[in-house]
Image (spheres, rainbow, N blue to C red):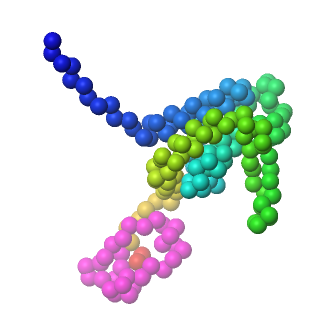
Amino acid sequence: MTPVDVQPIAVDPVEMFERVLEHAWQILKEAFDAYGSLPEIQTLFEGTDLTMPKQAAELVLVNMLLEISESISRFSPWYTKPARSFGIISIRDPKSNCIRRSLAPEALQKWSTLINQLAVSIRKNSGLIHAVILVDGLMGGASSEDPCIVAHCGCLPPRTIQIKQSILDQANIICESCLQPFC
């Protein structure tokens, strides 16, 4: 009998993290009779502090619930329900005097399993989450309406830089060698 060549199975952290988010999203969709796909990671992690995974998980759940409340069919009984019905409450922050959204006590209890799963995943993948949010932010900031152009200075031969037209219009960028503006 020839031994079967056993290869170790590599676990992709991105895939595992996405599974946890998709699982939470699917459970919430089913609970509230909603539709739609998982929101962008920037939307889900808006306002979170990844150094505190439990609080970040709670805020991710709040952001998911807010998105769920926006994707309910008008024929659903959930369509006319207030945010509290979804387990979301508004709290005024005494330091900044700003209102922030949080989970109601009953929602914390109801979704504790999801919160714990999200917290573990956030703790394990905080670097990955930072990277994805950063890259998505940089890619989202690129606009086709604001093209990059090649600007030249007064040096011989001229130095060139590639820069967005809007930035060149707003600022006078000076060459450090010839002290002439790029145009």
Give 53 or 39, whichever is nearer the viewer.
Answer: 53
Question: Start and end of the magenta stretch?
Answer: 152-181
Q: Residue at x 69, y 35 (%)?
A: 111
Quick check: 10 left or right of 114? left
Please say whether residue 162 is one of the residues in the magenta stretch: yes
Q: Is residue 96 above or below residue 78?
A: below
Counting from the top left corner in percent of width and height, residue 112 is at 67, 37
Counting from the top left corner in percent of width and height, residue 73 is at 74, 28
Q: Residue extending furthest left?
A: 2
Q: Main secondary structure of the magenta part?
A: loop
**Residue 72 appears in which quarter of the rendering?**
top right
Give 162 or 29, whichever is nearer the viewer.
Answer: 29
Quick check: 180 left or right of 119? left
Quick check: 163 left or right of 98? left
Q: Residue at x 77, y 60 (%)?
A: 93
Counting from the top left corner in percent of width and height, residue 150 is at 37, 67
